[in-house]
Image: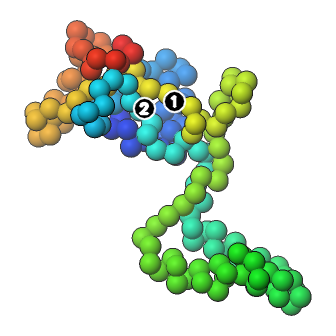
């Protein structure tokens, strides 16, 4: 088995990639900026375990303000960022397509420093450049990945394998 990504893997994909890596599965990433030869991360997105959308954050603020607060608490909250979010949240959210924040960090169980994986450099085992043939034939992508994983193919200079 081999994990193939374009580096855009993140969130749940990051969890799966980590489980595969810890069980010996090699990672291959295709693409990236041509000026950056060498190692790149297979997981280039968020490595957290839970993402909360901006809409969800606004909904919790509204719940805290409208349903969980008495009149006196609402007066106090109205002067805080929660009150501002309740007043202006719909206007702000109507101007953006989407957005979210990493709500829960992923930390490897064997990491004594307890550093969130988001801040740990974890390069892919192999990096490949996209070729014109790969753009038009997905089978060419998999042939190339097969060759570097089990055959005599080679990765870009600086790759681990």
Q: What element does badge 2 sit on?
A: loop
Q: x, y percentage for residue 55?
A: 57, 71
Q: Residue at x 70, y 72 (%)?
A: 60
Q: Residue at x 48, y 32 (%)?
A: 17
Q: Earlier in the sequence, mark 2 or mark 1?
A: 2
How many C-alpha atoms fall within 10 Å of the one at disc 2: few (<14), some, or many (≥20)? many
The image quarter containing residue 158 is: top left
**Residue 139, visible in the rendered structure:** no
Q: What element does badge 1 sit on?
A: loop
Q: Residue at x 46, y 67 (%)?
A: 98
Q: Residue at x 79, y 81 (%)?
A: 77
Instruction: Locate the N terminus and report the quarter of the image it occupies.
Output: top left
Instruction: Locate the C terminus and report the quarter of the image it occupies.
Output: top left
Please indicate whether residue 67 sits to the left or right of residue 91 in the image. right
Mark carried by residue 41 = 2
Q: Label 1, on which residue?
A: 121
Q: x, y percentage for residue 61?
A: 70, 75
């Amino acid at each position: 088995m081999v994990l193939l990504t374009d580096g855009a893997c993140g969130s749940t994909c990051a969890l799966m990639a980590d489980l595969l890596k810890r069980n010996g599965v090699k990672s291959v990433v295709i693409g990236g900026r041509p000026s950056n030869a060498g190692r790149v991360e297979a997981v280039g997105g968020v490595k957290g375990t839970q993402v909360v959308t901006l809409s969800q954050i606004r909904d919790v603020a509204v719940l805290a303000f409208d349903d969980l607060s008495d009149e006196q608490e609402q007066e106090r909250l109205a002067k805080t960022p929660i009150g501002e979010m309740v007043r202006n949240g719909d206007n702000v959210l109507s101007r953006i397509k989407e957005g979210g924040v990493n709500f829960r960090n992923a930390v490897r169980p064997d990491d004594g420093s307890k550093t969130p994986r988001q801040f740990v450099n974890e390069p892919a085992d192999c990096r490949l450049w996209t070729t014109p043939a790969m753009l038009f034939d997905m089978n060419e992508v998999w042939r190339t990945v097969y060759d570097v994983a089990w055959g005599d193919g080679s990765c870009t200079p600086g790759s681990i394998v």
